[in-house]
Amino acid sequence: MRISRRISELPPYPFAEIDRRIEEKKRQGVDVINFGVGDPDLPTPAHIIAVLCEEASDAANHRYPSYQGMRSFREAAAAWVAGRFGFTLDPDREVLALIGSKEGIAHFPMAVLDTGDIALVPNPSYPVYRTATLFCGGVPVEMPLREERGFLPDLAAVPEETWRKARLLFVNYPNNPTTAIADHAFFEELVYYARKHEVVLAHDLAYSEITFDGYVAPSLLEIPGAKGVAIEFHSLSKTYNMTGWRIGFAVGGEDIIAPFAKVKENIDSGVFNAVQLAAVAALRGPQDCVRDNCGVYARRRDILLEGLRSIGWEVAAPMATLYIWMRVPRGHDSRSFTTELLEKAGIVVAPGSAYGSRGEGYVRFSLTLSDQLLLEGVDRIGKAFS
């Protein structure tokens, strides 16, 4: 059977490759500890589950949902955004339900890119930005993220010719995989360039609520004028430990949300109503569960940092996300170091090169393990490399 060129030219999805390596080692009898994938091990809060159970038994929720999302969900999303970031949204025109933010990010380029149009994509970055561009015939052009710049792209270094052809620019702060954060000044610069060159900004804000040490992540849409040039993707996955539920939402100006809604009308049939109603409970309900999550991840971060630093490895403390981004020890590249961790200690981490060529020389540790597994992993690493 002949498959499309766009599929045959895609590299393996990094998390699928991590799963493959884990299964291979398990068949060999190795007890693997997986620091590779950012899937929260903490349970979804009980009040959210209770609403799902109740609403799932209501036959009225068993029919096709709204393409745009239930109004109660869109209202809850708009209210949450207003309370968290301080700006208002029209739930009828500026909010769109998503089957998880990954789905939204993957489909959004279809709304703004024609064949041959350029999308500016950070390197390293979440792989979906690049593949989504390729799937709709766009051309991804890389923006290097360098440690010396705080892993922020140098917008002034993008050639004018590229700006003229660009239609879309992806950003993600707090950042996966680098854990970098951005301030209002950078977002103001982004909006300036987007307005000047008529480029749409797509901001992946999945990690806005996983922050430490008093840091509070801003929204790109807080910047005056941003709503006319930007869309922001929000996820309940990490905030409320709902990765398997597949629910998120996009917000932005009507001129951006409307064409995106048209794409989704022709691709999917919306999110199960019972899941949307449970998400309403998450967004409108008590937020102490979010604070508790951050406390758990901060403790795990500090345990892992102490263990890695005790070996003599240099690693910065992240102020957000579920990850630690570490430069590999001297004499290694990303792949060789991840291989050595697996062979010596039965530890899986994500090689930085899986997120793009600029990720070479780094690895990403996830904090989504139980405390027991985390402590055992730190102990194994210490014994193998001390």
Image (tube, rainbow, N blue to C red):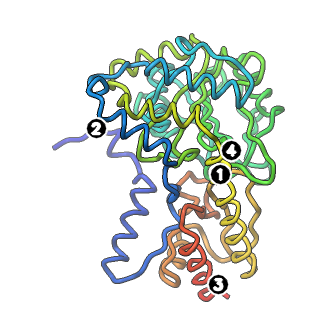
Label 1 Cα crowd, 10 Å radius (few <14 / some 14-19 / many 20+): many
From the viewer's perspective, is residue 332 above or below residue 144? below
Query: Could you tell me residue 344's position as x and y percent?
Result: 52, 84
From the viewer's perspective, is residue 292 above or below residue 195? below
Q: Nearer the viewer, mark 1 or mark 2?
A: 1
Residue 4 marker = 2
- Residue drawn at x 51%, y 30% is 280
Q: Which residue is mark 1?
A: 321
Q: Quadrant of the N terminus?
A: top left
- Residue drawn at x 32%, y 24% is 269
Q: What amino acid does circle 4 point to?
A: Pro
Question: Left or right: 98 with respect to 315?
Answer: left
Query: Could you tell me residue 306's position as x and y percent?
Result: 74, 74
Q: Secondary structure at mark 4?
A: loop
Residue 82 or residue 98, whichever sits in front: 82
Residue 206 marker = none
Query: Could you tell me residue 310's position as x and y percent?
Result: 75, 81
Q: Which residue is mark 3?
A: 382
Label 4 Cα crowd, 10 Å radius (few <14 / some 14-19 / many 20+): many
Mark earlier in primary sequence (1, 2)? 2
Q: Secondary structure at mark 1?
A: loop
Q: Secondary structure at mark 3?
A: helix
Q: Are marks 1 and 2 in contact (CB under 8 Å)?
A: no
- Residue drawn at x 84%, y 32% is 185
Q: What amino acid does circle 2 point to?
A: Ser
- Residue drawn at x 49%, y 24% is 73
Q: Are marks 4 and 1 in contact (CB under 8 Å)?
A: yes
CA distance for labels 3 and 2: 46 Å
Q: What amino acid does circle 3 point to?
A: Gly
Q: Which residue is mark 4?
A: 174
Mark earlier in primary sequence (3, 1)? 1
